[in-house]
Each structure stands twice: as structure tokens, then as C-alpha cells.
């Protein structure tokens, strides 16, 4: 029979997990949600969800929209996020290089890492972006939201230089064709990763969105595994005018210097 203290600890841990799952649910849905919607998404009772919501609201982690009575992430989450960005060691290393590259190419520069919290597939997450010049993209890799690795340059290069790559995992998952250029065949993707390792950079040639191209390079640790990646993203005409090789050359220099700082 479990001791009373052990039972209390298990209840507390379950409550923490439920709280984190609730906040992640609203974050990934990227919209305000009602109690019923949240409960259904989490597989919980509305009464249980209401108690968690009330606590989070009292501490500023959730707000309730008075017009529709739905809930969204509050100001406290934003403050924590800004603090994480400010203090993250990887962002501190990458930021000056991302700024220089954005100024040089006058395009968007993304800094991304693998998201290991998602175990169903290989995911990446963009942790920092720098906008170059006045040109703005319609969309790029969703900032601070996980996305699958196979269709973005940063995702592909992070996976190509990962230490947990399994072709058995790749073969089990369906590749969604976001555009006619998205790689959807597991064997073709395997060859793509091989080419990336040979040339040292990855290209997203309108694989995520028509008209959008990206070039990405890895920042490697002493074992040769990617700890983060940088990409230059822009409209097809702009990126191809700059030249994939030219962009990759500058990215390799920057990523090489960053690699020396994390070894």
C-alpha cells in the first residue's frame, strides 16, 4: 500500500501535467478555446478543466475574452517567453550572426532547434527570427510552434545531422504534400538527407509554400551532431538571384564560428 505522502506526490504531479497539457493545447490550437473544447481535446471532464483554468487565470497565465467567454494564453506566458529568449544560451550565440546575415542578404533569418518533446515524428521549432530590410514573408516556419522536419531547410539539416535518425521511423509516417515540390517518398527523402550531408546545407525549394525558398546550415557540436540550424528565407526570385551556393557559403562560415563556441 502506498504511503500517504507518495499518494499526495502522485496527485500533485498529475495536476502539474494536466496544467501543462492545457496550456500546450491552447498554444498549439493557436486560438481562443472554450472549456468544452479544451476538455474534449485533452480527454478530461469540463469540471476538472475549469479548476485548472481558474488557477491559471488567477496567476495571469490565462485570460478570458468577455465577448465570447473563451480562454487564451495570458500576459505571464508572454513575459516568460521573452525571458527565455533573452537568456537562452543558444539564442545569445546565434543572434549576432543572424543579425549580420539578415543585413547582408536583406532576407529573413531563422534559428531553429529540434523539438524532442514530440515523440511521434521528427519535429523542429524556430526559436529566433531576424527580419532583413523591408521585405517581409507572407509566412515562414511558425515561430515557437513545432513543425515536421521534412519540408523546411532547417528541419532537414537538423535531421540530416542528428544522432537519432531512423529510416524505420521515417518510413512509418505519411508525408503531406504542401506543394507539388514537397518530398513525399521516404526513399527520396533518405537520398535528400544524404545529399545534405555531402554538401553541408539544405534547401527548401518551394516545398512548404509556393514562392518561398530557404537555405539552411547546421551548427554542430564536437560529435558532429546539429544542436541548432540557421536559414535564410525569402521569395523564390530573391533567393535564387542571391544564389544557393553564395548563401550557403556565408551560412557555413557563421555556423562554423558558432560551432566553436559550443564545443
Image (cartoon, grey):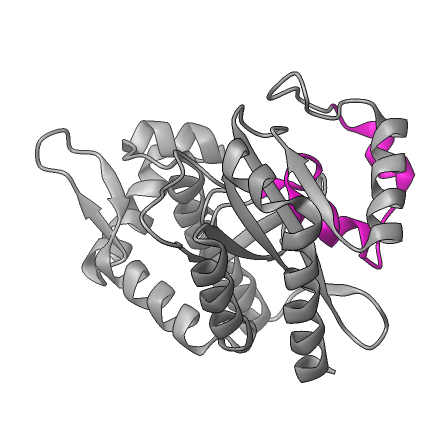
Per the picture, the main secondary structure of the magenta-coloured stretch is: helix
Residue 201 as seen in the image, left or right of residue 127: right
Residue sitting at the far front: 241
Residue located at (41% from left, 45% from top): 22
161 vs 181: above or below? below
Does residue 198 appear anywhere in the picture? yes
Residue located at (26% from left, 43% from top): 72
Residue 83 as seen in the image, left or right of residue 193: left
Residue 205 as seen in the image, left or right of residue 53: right
* Residue 176 rendering spot, x and y as whole percentages: 66, 22
* Residue 247 rendering spot, x and y as whole percentages: 63, 53
Q: Nearer the viewer, residue 208 or 254?
A: 254
Look at the image and say whether residue 169 sits in the magenta stretch: yes
Residue located at (29% from left, 60% from top): 78
* Residue 77 rendering spot, x and y as whole percentages: 32, 59
Residue sitting at the far top: 180
Quadrant in the picture for the N terminus: bottom right
- The residues colored magenta run 147-174
Residue 150 as seen in the image, left or right of residue 81: right
Residue sitting at the far left: 66
250 vs 74: above or below? below
Look at the image and say whether residue 203 sits in the magenta stretch: no
Q: Nearer the viewer, residue 132 or 39?
A: 132
* Residue 194 rendering spot, x and y as whole percentages: 89, 44
Residue located at (81% from left, 57% from top): 161
Q: Nearer the viewer, residue 80 or 219?
A: 219
Quadrant in the picture for the C terminus: bottom right
Amino acid at each position: 500500500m502506498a504511503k500517504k505522502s507518495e499518494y499526495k506526490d502522485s496527485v500533485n504531479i498529475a495536476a502539474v501535467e494536466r496544467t501543462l497539457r492545457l496550456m500546450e493545447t491552447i498554444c498549439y490550437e493557436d486560438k481562443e478555446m472554450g472549456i468544452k473544447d479544451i476538455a474534449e481535446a485533452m480527454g478530461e471532464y469540463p469540471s476538472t478543466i475549469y479548476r485548472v483554468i481558474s488557477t491559471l487565470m488567477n496567476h495571469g497565465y490565462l485570460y478570458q475574452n468577455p465577448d465570447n467567454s473563451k480562454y487564451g494564453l495570458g500576459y505571464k506566458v508572454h513575459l516568460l517567453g521573452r525571458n527565455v529568449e533573452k537568456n537562452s544560451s543558444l539564442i545569445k550565440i546565434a543572434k549576432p550572426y543572424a543579425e549580420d546575415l539578415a543585413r547582408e542578404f536583406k532576407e529573413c533569418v531563422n534559428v531553429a532547434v529540434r523539438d524532442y518533446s514530440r515523440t511521434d515524428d521528427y519535429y523542429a521549432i524556430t526559436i529566433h527570427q531576424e527580419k532583413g530590410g523591408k521585405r517581409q514573408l507572407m509566412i515562414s516556419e511558425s515561430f515557437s510552434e513545432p513543425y515536421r522536419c521534412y519540408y523546411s531547410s532547417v528541419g532537414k539539416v537538423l535531421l540530416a545531422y542528428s544522432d537519432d535518425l531512423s529510416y524505420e521511423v521515417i518510413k512509418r509516417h505519411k508525408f503531406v504534400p504542401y506543394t507539388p515540390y514537397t518530398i513525399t517518398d521516404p526513399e527520396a527523402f533518405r537520398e535528400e538527407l544524404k545529399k545534405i550531408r555531402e554538401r553541408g546545407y539544405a534547401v527548401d525549394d518551394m516545398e512548404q509554400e509556393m514562392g518561398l525558398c530557404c537555405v539552411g546550415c547546421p551548427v554542430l557540436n564536437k560529435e558532429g551532431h546539429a544542436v541548432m540550424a540557421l536559414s535564410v528565407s525569402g521569395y523564390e526570385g530573391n533567393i535564387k538571384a542571391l544564389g544557393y551556393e553564395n548563401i550557403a557559403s556565408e551560412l557555413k562560415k557563421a555556423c562554423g564560428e558558432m560551432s566553436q563556441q559550443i564545443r
